[in-house]
Structure formats: C-alpha cells, structure tokens
Amino acid sequence: MVNHMECKQRPIQTAPRSEVYTPGPSPIDPTTWRAPTKSTRAALLTLALALTSCQNMFTLADDKTLGAEAYVSLLSEETLAPPGPTTAMVEEVTLRLVTAAKSVDPQVANAFDWEVKVIQNDEVVNAFCLPGGKMAVYTGILPVAGGDTGLAVVMGHEIAHAIERHGTEAMTRQYGAALLIQILLEGTAQEWAELGSSLLQLSYGRDAELEADRRGLRYMARAGYDPRAAVEFWTRMAELGGEAPPEILSTHPSNAHRINQIKSLLPEFIPIYEANRVDTP
C-alpha cells in the first residue's frame, strides 16, 4: 500500500467507541520474557550479517512479536467499526488474499498470525499490514476502493509488504546492525516494546512499494480478483492528491510510474486471474 504511517497524524477521537479492542495476553510479558539463547542467536545473527549485509537482522518470530506489540498499541487508541456488512467484506477479502499468499509464499505466510480489524475513521484514507500479519483498514479508504476488488488491491499490496518483510528490513537500516544485535541478544522487554512501537513510524522506499505492487497483484489474481482494478484504484487515489495527497501516497512512486508498471504487469497476472476467478450472479 499504502504507507502505514497515517498514525503519526491521526485525528483525536472524541466520538464514543462502538467497539473497544480487547487484546489477549500481551505479546511481551516483562515478568516472564527472556532474551533468546545467546549462543544460538549470536551464531545466526553473525551468519546473517555475513550473508545478507544486514538486510534484515530479524527472524520471522521477531516479526510476529514486534508487529503484535505495535498492533495492540495502535488499536488501543482507535475506534473499531461494529460488526456488519463492511467488516464482513473486509474479512472476506483478507481471508481470500491470505489464502493466496499461503499458496504462493508458504514459508513466510504460514508462519504469520493473520488478523484484520476495521477502524472507524472516515477521515483517514489508509490501510496497513504490520510485520507478522496484523492488519487494519480505515473506513476512509473504502469509498476509494469502491468494493471488494478495489479493497483487494490495497490489502494485497499491504500483505505483500509483510511477506517481503519490508518493515523489519527498514528497521534494520534505521537502527543499524550493531545496535540491533545488542537488543536481539540482550535487550529488555521494554526495549523490544520500543522496537515494536517504532514500526508505526517507518516508511518504505519506493523500490519496496513497487515490489509490493507486483506481489500484491499476484495475490489478488490468485484469489480471484481482477488485477486490472489496480489501475482504476490508483487512478482514483491520484485524483485525491493535489497539494495535500493522502498519507498513503507520501512515500510511494509517482502515480504515472506506478500505473505504468501495473499496466506492464497485467499480461502476466490476467491469466492467473482467469484461472481463479470467482463468477458471481
């Protein structure tokens, strides 16, 4: 997607909450949490440092822990939409896309704990998927999506960010290998919680956005959603631009570049869609 940084400028909520998010046990319990075994973790991190030049110092388990921490923090400050047709549509689209992702990229997708919530805020045109599979859709993006296929464009893109692990890659770049090795080996529960919170302030680069566009198209085509809808969706997003574009466009490629790339990819993904399309009356 869609930049998940909208929370930096989130309007103050004054309306009564229609639903309060009640998380389960904290993903990081300071009373029971223990740092990973040093010898094992040190060997793995040293190998990762040598082989990947610190592209991502986190494990898939770290992605889940950090994403869950950030999710609890963000949703505790938001109003959730009540159960109904809107939440049902979001859940159905998400289920189909996650199923597709598990088929295309099983090693990562099957390791994550997928969950989606709808945030009641018509002023925010945004959606996100945190590392580890925790997702949210703001009601403000639904009119732009225009239906389930348009929503699949956004959520396919966001799920692709999580599968490609762009969040923890960005965190690796931001913090640097030396500091992260120290935290991963000996960090306290508070330091891990702060890492999770920092996910909400990260931005992806434009190369990562284009990569997520491509993989997101594959997911939506595999899930039976017409990838041609991506051109229409991003065209509508561009029309919301002007001097103050939506937050989700702030770190994205230019509209023309994105749309041209999507058009060039359609011949690859339309046959996948045709083989998996769901015909409706």
Image (cartoon, helix red, strand yellow):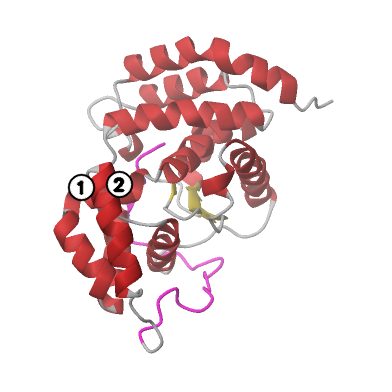
Q: What's the amino acid at mark 1? A: Arg
x%, y% of residue 198?
Answer: 26, 59
Q: Three-letter amino acid code at disc 2?
A: Glu
The residue to which callout 1 is attached is 173
- Report the quarter where the C terminus lies: top right
Q: Establish if 130 lies above or below 270.
A: below
Horizontally, residue 88 falls left or right of residue 41, namely right
Q: Position of residue 268 (x, y in %)?
A: 56, 14
Residue at x 29%, y 51% (from the top left corner) = 48
Q: Secondary structure at mark 1?
A: helix
Q: Which residues are magenta?
A: 1-30
**Marks 2/1: CA distance?**
6 Å
Q: Are marks 2 and 1 in contact (CB under 8 Å)?
A: yes
Is 24 covered by the magenta stretch? yes
- Residue 12, located in which quarter of the rendered image? bottom left
User: Would you say the magenta stretch is mainly helix, strand or loop?
Assistant: loop
Residue in the foreground of this view, choosing between 4 and 123: 4
Q: Which residue is mark 2?
A: 169
Quick one: label 1, few (<14), some, or many (20+) residues within 10 Å?
A: some
Point out the residue furthest to the right here.
281
Query: Which quadrant holds the N terminus?
Result: top left
Residue at the image point whose x is 45% and y is 52% from the top: 121
User: How far across and down, in percent of the image, does residue 188 sit?
Assistant: 26, 78
Residue 11, given in percent of the width and then of the height, sits at 32, 55
Depicted 278 relative to depicted 26: above or below: above
* Image height of 146 relative to 166, above or below: above
Residue drawn where x is 33% and y is 36% of the image: 246
Picture quadrant of residue 38: bottom left
